Every structure is written in structure tokens, then in C-alpha cells.
Amino acid sequence: MTRLTAILLSALIAAAPLSAANAQDRGNRGDRDRGGDRNGQEFQREPRRISEAEAQGIAQSRARGARFVGSLGLRGNSYVFRFERDGQIIDISVDSRG
């Protein structure tokens, strides 16, 4: 075996796992990633909405120790929560779409 043949063979062996991984990555996942189901019908994904309790937890972490006063509910696509710190009212909004 010549040196050139050995180098080419080792390069092919080294490249084989990468091309196999790429082929697996492009594998058949169905049409769901492209906006349709297996029958070719299109559907729209409903955006995930977080619960008000989850949003309140996020808002409390953003408030950094401020006292929770109340919830102003869902305003558009955001939950709005009211906090108080040192006499100042702070409104914190959290996007409901996760």
C-alpha cells in the first residue's frame, strides 16, 4: 500500500462518521416540521401559553424582593403583575407565549 493510498483511506474512514451523522440528522421526521401532517394537510401550531402562576414566578424573580400587590391579568399577550418597594409601585409584564 502506498503512502497516498493510506492517507486517502484514513481520510475516508475519518469522514464516514460525520457523513453518517449528517444523514441521520436529515432523516425523515415527517412533515410536522414543515407545517403539515403526513397526509399533506397543513396546520398551524398553537403558540404555547404559560400559566399565570408560571408568569407570576418569573415576575417575582424579576422584582427582586419587592412585595407582591396583585395581578392585573392578561393584557394582550402579556401577564401584568404589580409589586411595591419602598412606596413605589412597579408593574412587571411577562410574555404569555413562553
Image (cartoon, rainbow, N blue to C red):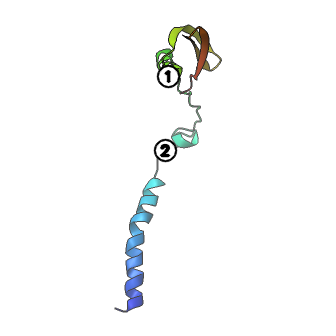
Q: Is residue 18 above or below residue 1?
A: above
Q: Residue at x 50, y 21 (%)?
A: 64
Mark 1: secondary structure: helix
- Residue 63, percent from left and from top: 53, 19
- Image coordinates for residue 52, horizontal then vertical, percent: 51, 15
Q: Which residue is the site of mark 2?
A: 30
Alpha carbon separation for disc pair 1 and 2? 35 Å
Location of residue 71 in the rendering, given as x and y in whole percent from the top left corner: 55, 9
Residue 8, image x and y in percent?
42, 82
Label 2 neighbourhood size at 10 Å, few (<14), some (14-19), many (20+)? few
Quarter that holds the N terminus: bottom left
Q: Amino acid at mark 1?
A: Ile
Q: Are marks 1 and 2 in contact (CB under 8 Å)?
A: no
Comparing 73 with 2, the one in front is 73
Q: Report the mark closest to the observer, 1 or 2.
A: 1
What residue is rendered at 39% in x and 72% in y? Answer: 14
**Closer to the N terminus: mark 1 or mark 2?**
2
Q: Can you identify the residue that label 1 sits on?
A: 58
Name the one closer to the observer, 66 or 28: 66
Q: Nearer the viewer, residue 1 or 64?
A: 64
Identify the residue shown where x is 58% and y is 39%.
35
Most distant residue in the front direction: 86
Q: Residue 10 got which mark? A: none
Q: Is residue 31 above or below residue 62?
A: below
Amino acid type shown at disc 2 = Gly
Q: What residue is at 50 percent from the left and 16 percent from the top?
A: 56
Q: Residues within 10 Å of mark 1 (few under 14, many from 20)?
A: some
